[in-house]
Image (cartoon, rainbow, N blue to C red):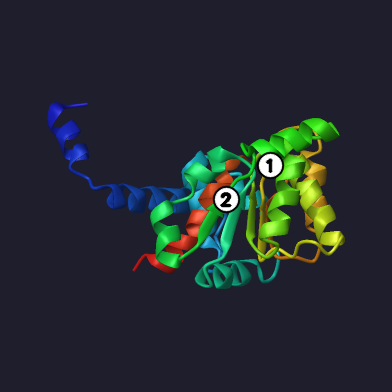
Amino acid sequence: MLEGEKLKLLEINPMEIEKRSFAIIEEELRSMGIELSEDKKHVYLRAIHTSADFDYARNLVFSNDALERGEEALKRGTVVITDTNMGKSGINKQALKKLGCGLECFMADEQVAALAKERHVTRAIVSMEQAAKLYPNGIYVIGNAPTALIRLGELIDEGKCQPALVIGVPVGFVNVVESKEWIMTKGVPYIVAKGRKGGSNIGAAICNAMMYKLTRT
């Protein structure tokens, strides 16, 4: 690459880089025969942009009212709950502030850790129980622990939790596929990455996509 070309690249502002990236993603998807639906495009693009993984154009699935219910909750200033501090750190704080939303993760909570040890269960399980007590109607972003998604489904069945939206995208091999299929049967709005793929970064990206739609002009 020539020195002048390097300087030209450095002059591109971040929003322009993002805009160009999205255009490239759409162009490549079209070459694969995939045309994104307009109402969900912002979510697909953000997930692919975050991961450079085009599989998300196929494996992200939405309940019929997922985006509407999620966006309504965000506009009401709901609390977003994550299953990892990594997921929490990836959610845009400026967008949250504009919407008046809260953000919580209980995985590092000392009481949660002590109770999990006492009961011989994962902290993810206890953190979901704590979240359900405090924020039964929040938006739940599960990007790492399938046990969190399974316990959340149980809490819904028990009538202790009725999330405004569940973003269910844990990644891995043990109970991952099953936990995603399970949460899709609970009668709550969901966005799920079917299969083994996902991650805290994908969960945060989906949440950010929704917030950016509401806050960016």
SS state under label 1: loop
Mark 1 belongs to which amino acid?
Pro
Left or right: 158, with 64 as reference point: right
Return the x and y of residue 167 as percentages of the image width and height. Answer: 65, 54
SS state under label 2: strand
Return the x and y of residue 125 as percentages of the image width and height. Answer: 77, 42
Mark 1, residue position: 170
Mark 2 belongs to which amino acid?
Glu
Q: Residue at x 84, y 35 (%)?
A: 119
Q: Are marks 2 and 1 in contact (CB under 8 Å)?
A: no
Q: Residue at x 45, y 49 (%)?
A: 25
Label 2 packing within 10 angstroms: few (<14), some (14-19), many (20+)? some
Q: Residue at x 38, y 47 (%)?
A: 21
Mark 2, residue position: 104
Between 162 and 192, which is closer to the camera in this rendering?
162
Residue 32 visible from this viewpoint: no
Between 132 and 90, which is closer to the camera in this rendering?
132
